[in-house]
Image (tube, grey):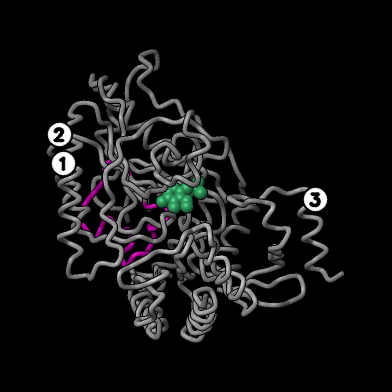
Amino acid sequence: MDKNEALRQRDLAVLWHPTTQMKDHEWLPLLPVSSGNGVWLKDMQGKRYIDAISSWWVNLFGHANPHISGAVAEQAQCLEHVILAGVTHEPAVRLAEKLVDITPPGLERVFFADSGASAVEISLKMSFHYWRNTGDEGRTRFVTLSNSYHGDTLGALSVGDAGLFKSAYEPLLMEPLVAPSPDCFALPRSEWDRHAENKLADMREIFARHEGEICAVIIEPLVQCAGGMRMYPASYLSGLRSLCDEYNIHLIADEIAVGFARTGSMFACEQGGISPDFMCVSKGLTGGYLPMSAVLTSEQVYTAFYAEYTTLRGFLHSHSYTGNALACAAALATLELFEQRDVLADNRRLARLMLESVSELQDDEHIGDIRQTGMILAVEMVAQREPMIQYDWKERRGMKVYQHALQQGVLLRPIGNTVYFMPPYVINPDEIGLIASAAIDGIRLATAD
Ligand SMILES: Cc1ncc(COP(=O)(O)O)c(C=O)c1O
């Protein structure tokens, strides 16, 4: 038995994998990874694979990045972790200072947590609690966008709209108000702003109908990633900020997937020229090294919680690993890498190459949409282009692309019928070519019948 197979068998005897129907692994072999370097992963037999999806969108500067690895190793020699309640340490303070510095103006307080979903939970609780603390106790509802995703814990799941992840748990969940997404699927760019404006009108209606009931609206700025890399223009962000101001409703920007230069600016909110009331960051925060997240908010929100202990106005929320020193060191080292070169300018060049690399699919009768926002490129497979007929997701055509690409040494992970590239920023033009050729061949195979 080869080393890959041996590890697979041991795994299947004890492990339960995330977002996986484990029965699939009766026919779909796990990929056993022994090491990583840059955009490359190596299996137990030495075969190499390009990580075209940045390992669930967390990796920014490659696997085993010497600068980040060195910083984590150095920190581990000194302080690995310490309780953050009643205690502080230099890496946590430096990281908080840095985050305040690089995020949009007005975000001046940083609350650390350990996953994207926990950051979302914190932003929801803080918003709700802020209104209570300021005497506005009638506010109990959240607004979300259709097709949104904010994580899998019960609170985060509640404010998402991903039926597949959510339906089994419906009886346990809060009920959000759902506004139609500004998703511009299959629309020409020239129509995006008009489409966004229409969707803002729908949002206004919800705000007006539920005046005084809403704590916050939560959005994924510019790209609904888990919803199939659905994209919309920055004009929606600025319009929504104005609406939130008009109706006195918090805006929560979930930048967990799109933060840290994924969309062409350091944070997606910048493109709309807006500051949210809460910003959730995670994933790329530590360059893909360690689990960590943060919620940034304003001094005004912070002040509403500042009182004598016995008033119960404080934010009594924690996670054991909050402010973990190793994660802080990884995050600081990641942010240093942004200072060493013009990552945004380099990414613009890479993004152009990514788009060019799939140009031959432009007129394919089974491609319904090719869309791009910064370092996220998505190609949608459809049964028919005009008039458009989408494939039933149960056909699992994306899985065929996944399998083919893996044989070619490329790790893709299509979402339904959406094949996307979201590679680490250290990818080179040849590697983009390899991803594209594996994806294009895979798409042709998957759409052949
Ligand atoms: C926009 C967004 N929010 C929240 C999350 C949840 O993050 P985590 O998986 O770290 O809990 C994700 C994960 O994909 C995400 O894309």
- The percent coordinates of residue 1 (x first, y second) are 87, 69
Q: Is mark 3 within 8 Å of ligand 1?
A: no
Callout 2–callout 1 Cβ contact below 8 Å: yes
User: In the image, what residue type sits under mark 1?
Assistant: Arg
Callout 2–callout 3 Cβ contact below 8 Å: no
| SS under mark 2 | helix
Q: Which residue corresponds to the image point at 23% horizontal and 19% vertical from the top-left?
A: 135
Residue 132: numbered disc = none
Magenta span dominant secondary structure: loop
Residue most extreme to the right: 1
Quadrant of residue 44 within the rendered picture:
bottom right
Read off the residue under disc 1: 204
Is 382 one of the magenta-colored residues?
no
Is 269 one of the magenta-colored residues?
yes
**Residues in magenta, as a range:** 255-278
Tell me: residue 258, above or below residue 127: below
Read off the residue under disc 2: 208
Q: Nearer the viewer, residue 196 or 328?
A: 196
Q: Is mark 2 within 8 Å of ligand 1?
A: no
Is residue 91 visible in this depiction of the protein? Answer: no
Residue most extreme to the left: 246
Q: Nearer the viewer, residue 412 or 394?
A: 394
Q: Is mark 1 within 8 Å of ligand 1?
A: no
Read off the residue under disc 3: 13
